[in-house]
C-alpha cells in the first residue's frame, strides 16, 4: 500500500523516537531508524537532510506531548498550587519505575551533544525546557504567588536535578524528595 509523504515522515519520526529514547542518539544509526520505519535510507534522507535534522525533529516531536502530560497531571490534582506541582513529581516517580524508563530525552540528548552547543537538537531541548518553565510561571502567577519567574526556575531546577539523580541512582525517591522541596518552595508543607 503506497504511503503519502506525511505518513512516511511520521513513521520515520516514530521509529527515531523509539530508538533514540531507548538507546541514545549516538548509538542509533540512520540505517537502524530506516529499518525500524520500514523505509529505505534514501527515503529517510528525502524527508530529513541529515541525522542531525532527524535528532532535532525527534525532540521537537516530544515537546508538546511532554508539556501536555505535565499539564494533565497538574490539572487532575485537587488542591493548592503546591499540591499540584508536587503531583507532577509523584507521577514522574511512578513513571521512572517502569523498566523502559530512560530519563529525560531532552537532557540525555543535550549531554550527548555537550560539545555541540549550537546543534539544532540542543536548541530544541532548550526551547522545551523554557516552555515548561514558562508554563509553570504562568500557573504560579495565576495562584497569586510572588516571584513567579524565580519560583518556576527553581522548580525546573529541582525537576531536572531529580531526572539526573534518578537516572544515575535508579531511585524514584529523588523525584519524591524534589516534589516535597517544590511544594515547600510554593507554600505547601512539603
Image (tube, grey):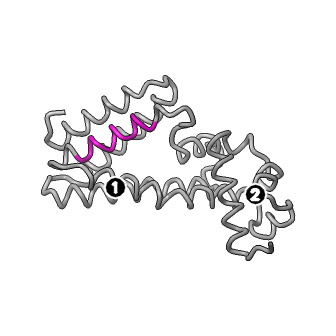
* Residue visible at 64% across and 55% down in the picture: 119
Which image quarter holds the C terminus? top left
What's the CA distance linking mark 1 and mark 2? 30 Å
Front position in the image: 157 or 101? 101
Q: Is residue 35 magenta?
A: no
Residue ID for mark 2:
37
Look at 32% across and 50% down and name the residue there: 73
Front in this rendered view, residue 55 or 113: 55
Mark 2, residues whose alpha carbon is within 10 Å: few (<14), some, or many (≥20)?
Answer: many
Secondary-structure class at tag 1? helix
Q: Nearer the viewer, residue 63 or 100?
A: 100
Q: Is residue 42 above or below residue 129?
A: below
Residue at position x 14%, y 34% from top? Answer: 189
Label 2 secondary element: helix
Q: Quadrant of the N terminus?
A: bottom right
- State the extent of the magenta-drawn residues as a range: 84-95
Residue at mark 1: 72
Graded by Cα atoms within 10 Å as few (under 14), some (14 to 19) or many (20 or more), the crowding at tag 1 reads few
Residue 89: x percent and y percent? 34, 39
What main secondary structure does the magenta stretch of the protein show? Answer: helix
* Image position, residue 63 (x, y; %): 49, 58
Amino acid at each position: 500500500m503506497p504511503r503519502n509523504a506525511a505518513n512516511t515522515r511520521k513513521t520515520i519520526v516514530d521509529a527515531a523516537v523509539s530508538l533514540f529514547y531507548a538507546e541514545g542518539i549516538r548509538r542509533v544509526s540512520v540505517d537502524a531508524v530506516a529499518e525500524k520505519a520500514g523505509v529505505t535510507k534514501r527515503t529517510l534522507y528525502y524527508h530529513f537532510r541529515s541525522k542531525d535534522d532527524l535528532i532535532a525533529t525527534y525532540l521537537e516531536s516530544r515537546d508538546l506531548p511532554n508539556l501536555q502530560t505535565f499539564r494533565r497531571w497538574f490539572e487532575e490534582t485537587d488542591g493548592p498550587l503546591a499540591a499540584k506541582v508536587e503531583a507532577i513529581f509523584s507521577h514522574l516517580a511512578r513513571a521512572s519505575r517502569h523498566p523502559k524508563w530512560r530519563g529525560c530525552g531532552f537532557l540525555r540528548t543535550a549531554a550527548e551533544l555537550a560539545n555541540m552547543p549550537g546543534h539544532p537538537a540542543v536548541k530544541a531541548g532548550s526551547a522545551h525546557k523554557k516552555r515548561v518553565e514558562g508554563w509553570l510561571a504562568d500557573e504560579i502567577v495565576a495562584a497569586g504567588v510572588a516571584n513567579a519567574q524565580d519560583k518556576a526556575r527553581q522548580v525546573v531546577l529541582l525537576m531536572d536535578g531529580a531526572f539526573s539523580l534518578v537516572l544515575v541512582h535508579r531511585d524514584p525517591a529523588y523525584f519524591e524528595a524534589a516534589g516535597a522541596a517544590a511544594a515547600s518552595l510554593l507554600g505547601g508543607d512539603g
